Amino acid sequence: MASPLFDALDLGPLSLPHRVAMAPLTRNRAAEGNVPAEMNATYYRQRADAALLISEATQVAPKGQGYPRTPGIHSDAQVDGWKKVTDAVHDAGGRIFLQLWHVGRISHSVYHDGEKPVAPSAITPEGQVLTPDLEMVPFETPRALETEEVPEVVEQYRHGAENARRAGFDGVEIHGANGYLIDQFLRSGTNQRTDRYGGSLDNRLRFLREVTAAVTDVWGPERVGLRLSPLSPFNDMEDDTPGATFHWAASTADDFGLAYVHLVEPSAPKPPVAGDGKAADVFDGIRETFDGALVANGNYDTATATDAIERGYADLVAFGRAFLANPDLPRRLKEGLPINVPDEDTFYNGDEHGYTDYPTWEELQNGVSFDTLDALSELKARG
Ligand code: PHB
């Protein structure tokens, strides 16, 4: 029987030809000024067969950066650079959302002319940050935002959303996951504020609500998604009551009528509703709370993605590593073809190598060589 992974889907005003989306992937290859350039346009155009491309995380303001060469969406030059990307994707028949990002405390003063990173509370993350010179140094203690500064940061998201429109995107995804600024407000481990942005769960949700209001003002809710990572400890995150926190985060997305919620899930079981109690409770709860489309992400293959859709859990499945290494991933999955093995050494930073030189299946048939071809038939598509 044909997999529902290849059935069409209406997502707000967009008609998606199938359910294989590309997950946002940081690649650290923007040009000077954190401006996307031709090489980046080529990379996204090559992957335009995705049901939906979600761009790499893109900072809405200089203070939102915490990694080398991540693109921004705050300057005119960046808007012009992204326009090259969206034109290339649209010429190839694709659809692309921009992911709006602010890293909060996951940064370093070296990115901010000596000023400390900002966060909900002055809590130092465990771990290290990569400087622009590609050195690993310990995180610093961030500066807690003053109450009256928070609306200014909300306006930075609005500005990013407006610029994304000018740059020709089809919509935007609010990055509320992976321990970055919105997630730092949401989860109790990083939010010890005593003003209206902290304390009660309702207060911890306020920043997300205000950002969502600003972004949907610009785009309309049917072109806005929200990414969440309810159980992920990445970037030193924790929460006392993840079931309640993310039930209410999903409920916020539902109140605004967002097009989709995009979930970063534990790697197993797939889908998370299938097994372990804690994950099943949290993810089932989100599915029940949110009426829009659900984008599942994390370690799926064709069989588990099909199962997630058949169960009515997911509407779309986003693939990261597999899409990075296989520009024609939807075709490979649909036809059950072997897939190229991703090269971890070229995930971050660098040039075209490991970025725009992964061959399509057709190129492989036409004699293009690929150094990890041997392993092709052994690897399943991993999200
Ligand atoms: C990263 O650059 O490591 C990164 C960025 C955005 C994410 C996750 C990881 O959501």
Image (spheres, rainbow, N blue to C red):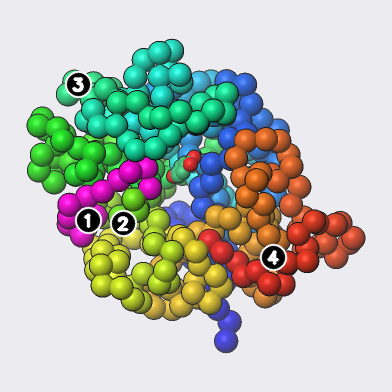
- Disc 2, ligand 1: is the CB inside 8 Å? no
What secondary structure is marked by label 1? helix
Q: Is 244 rendered above or below residue 352?
A: below
Residue linked to disc 4: 339
Residue linked to disc 2: 231
Residue 146: mark in rendering: 3
Q: Are marks 2 and 1 in contact (CB under 8 Å)?
A: yes
Per the rendered image, the range of residues in magenta is: 234-246
Q: Position of residue 134 (x, y in %)?
A: 57, 28
Residue 300 visible here:
yes
Residue linked to disc 1: 242
> What count of labels does the image hold?
4
Residues packed near mark 1 inside 10 Å, few (<14), some (14 to 19) or many (20 plus): many
In which quadrant of the rendered view does residue 150 lie? top left
Going from N to C along the chain, the mark reached first, 4 or 1, is 1
Q: Is 101 rendered above or below residue 78?
A: below
Going from N to C along the chain, the mark reached first, 3 or 1, is 3
How far apart are the two marked residues, 2 and 4, measured between alpha carbons? 29 Å
Going from N to C along the chain, the mark reached first, 2 or 3, is 3
How far apart are the two marked residues, 3 and 1, measured between alpha carbons? 26 Å
